[in-house]
Amino acid sequence: MTTADSDKVALITGGSRGIGYGVAEALVARGHRVCVTGRGEDALTAAVEALSAAAPDGAGRVIGVAGKAHDEAHQAVAVERVMEAFGRVDFLVNNAGTNPVFGPIAELDLGVARKVFETNVVSALGFAQRTYRAWQKENGGAIVNIASIAGVAPSPFIGAYGMSKAAMINLTVQLAHEMA
């Protein structure tokens, strides 16, 4: 790994567990600096501590920002904290997501549908816009949006989730077209 490689910084939404945590773990192991976000303060603190302990050169490579992905104030604070702590944001991994409902789409509560789209799609767009303005527009970088097979094929009883992941796939293509 070169020095330039370890100068890279990633912002990972939904990074306190699951796929997001795994991505953070892999990037920290490669010497990158990482900010993880998550809803639960305790889980986020534990993730930051574990990731920091695994960092090849010790503490100072991992920070956490608690909040809900769909909250625009949280998005702003997360990007600001990354820029204050590390001075750049090379990688954005939009991993935060929700699927609070299981059942037929014909009976789906529209408020729940809005929540799914706000968390799974609109928040990803918000984080992408903020990281683009804060660093990537002038310096380049990468945005990875985590989708699902449910976004390309119907999945029984998780229709809202599948629709949101189809929208995430389209958002990814649109962002690539506009920001490349």
Image: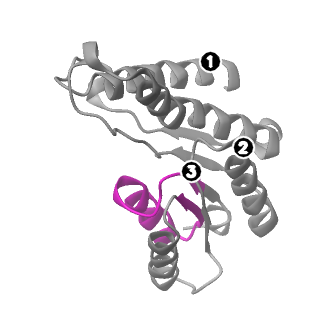
> Is 98 in front, or is 30?
98
At 61% from the left and 49% from the top, the residue drawn is 91
Mark 2 crowd level (few <14, some 14–19, many ≥20, 10 Å Cα): many
Category of crowding for the residue at label 3, using alpha-carbon neighbours closer than 10 angstroms: few (below 14), some (14–19), many (at least 20): some
Position of 167 compared to 107: left or right? right
Residue labelled with disc 2: 131
Q: Which residues are magenta?
A: 11-38
The residue positioned 19% from the left and 25% from the top of the image is 157
Q: Which residue is mark 3?
A: 68
Q: Amino acid at mark 1?
A: His
Q: x%, y% of residue 50? A: 44, 80
Q: Nearer the viewer, residue 68 or 129?
A: 68
Provide the secondary structure element on which disc 3 rests: loop
Percent from the top left, x then y, of residue 176? 59, 24
Question: In this rendering, is residue 91 above or below 63?
Answer: above
- Ranked by sequence position, the earlier of labels 1 and 3 is 3
Kindly state the secondary structure of the residue where label 2 is placed. Answer: helix
The residue beneath circle 1 is 177
Q: Are marks 3 and 2 in contact (CB under 8 Å)?
A: no
User: Is 146 above or below relative to 179?
Assistant: below
Quadrant of the image occupied by residue 17: bottom left
Q: Amino acid at mark 2?
A: Thr
